[in-house]
Image (spheres, helix red, strand yellow):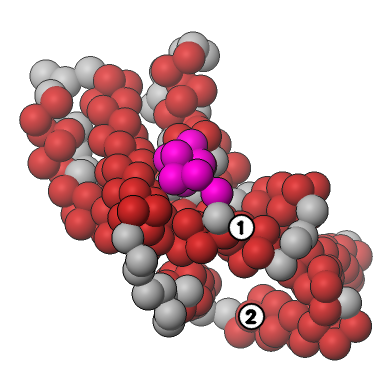
Amino acid sequence: MIRSAFNVTLPILFGFLPLGIAFGLLFQELGYPWYFSTLMGIFVYAGAAQFMAIGLIGAGVGLLEIAISTFFLNSRHLFYGLAFLKSFGRWSFRKFYLIFGLTDETYALMTTIKVPENFNRERYYLFITLFSQIYWVLGCTIGAIIGDALSFDTEGMEFAATALFVVLLIEQWIKVRKSLPFFIAFCSSCIALVLFSQHMLLVAIILSIAAIMILRLTKVVSDG
C-alpha cells in the first residue's frame, strides 16, 4: 500500500519539491531562521497562501489580516472536505489530518485514482496525503537551508508566486467558463487598489464576495 501511494504521488513530488524550494529561498529574504519555513510547511501547508504570506509579511501587514486573507484564499477547501467526509471514515485524528492535508493536487488525485480492492481506502488516502505534505515540507526546508547558508540571488524568483496564481486563475477559468466572476474580481481589485492600497487584498476579497452574494440574492428574488 505504501509503495502504491508513493508511486501515484510522484507527479505531486515533481511539482511540490521545486515550488517548495522556491518558497524556502524567498522566505529567507525576510530574515527569519531557516526552520520557520519548515514550520510553515508543517502547520500552514498551503502553497498559494504561503507565497502570499511572504509579500504580506514583507509589507508589514498584521497577522489578523494575513489570517483572514489566507482563510478566504483557501475557502474552496471547505467544499473539498465536504466531498470526502464519508470517504475519510469516522471522526478521528486521522480524519482531521486528511481534511487538513487536502490540497488542490491531492483532491484531484483522490477523485481520479481507483483504490485497489485489497487496500483500506482511508489508510490509502492517509499515505497519499502524508507523502504529499512530506514533499512540500522537504522542498521548503531545502530552499530555506540553501538560502540561509549561501548568498543566493533571488531576484525575479518572487514571480513564482505570481505564476502560481496565474495557473490557479487559468484552472478556474477552465472549470467555470463564466466571465462574470472574473469581471467582478477584476473590478473589485481595481477599486481596492485605488482606494485601499494598504489593505488591497482583503478589501478586494470582501468586495468580490459581497458583489456575488448580492447578485445571487437578486436572482433568487427575481426567480421567486
* Crowd tier of the residue under label 1, counting other residues whose Cα lies within 10 Å: few below 14, some 14–19, many 20 or above: some
User: Can you tell which quarter of the image residue 206 is in?
Assistant: bottom right
What span is in magenta?
32-39
Residue 56 in sight from this viewpoint: yes
Q: Residue 71 location in percent, x, y?
A: 68, 49
Give the labeled residue for mark 1: 53
Amino acid on which disc 1 is placed: Ala
Closer-to-camera residue (28/159): 28
In the drawing, what numbered circle is on residue 127?
none
Q: Is residue 131 above or below residue 208?
A: above
Q: Secondary structure at mark 1?
A: helix
Q: Is residue 160 magenta?
A: no
Looking at the image, which residue is at 16% across and 21% down? 119
User: Can you tell which quarter of the image residue 203 is in?
Assistant: bottom right
Give the labeled residue for mark 2: 182
Looking at the image, which residue is at 48% across and 57% down? 28
Looking at the image, which residue is at 32% across and 26% down? 126
Mark 1 or mark 2: whose residue is earlier in sequence: 1
Q: Is residue 195 above or below residue 130?
A: below
Residue 111 in sight from this viewpoint: no
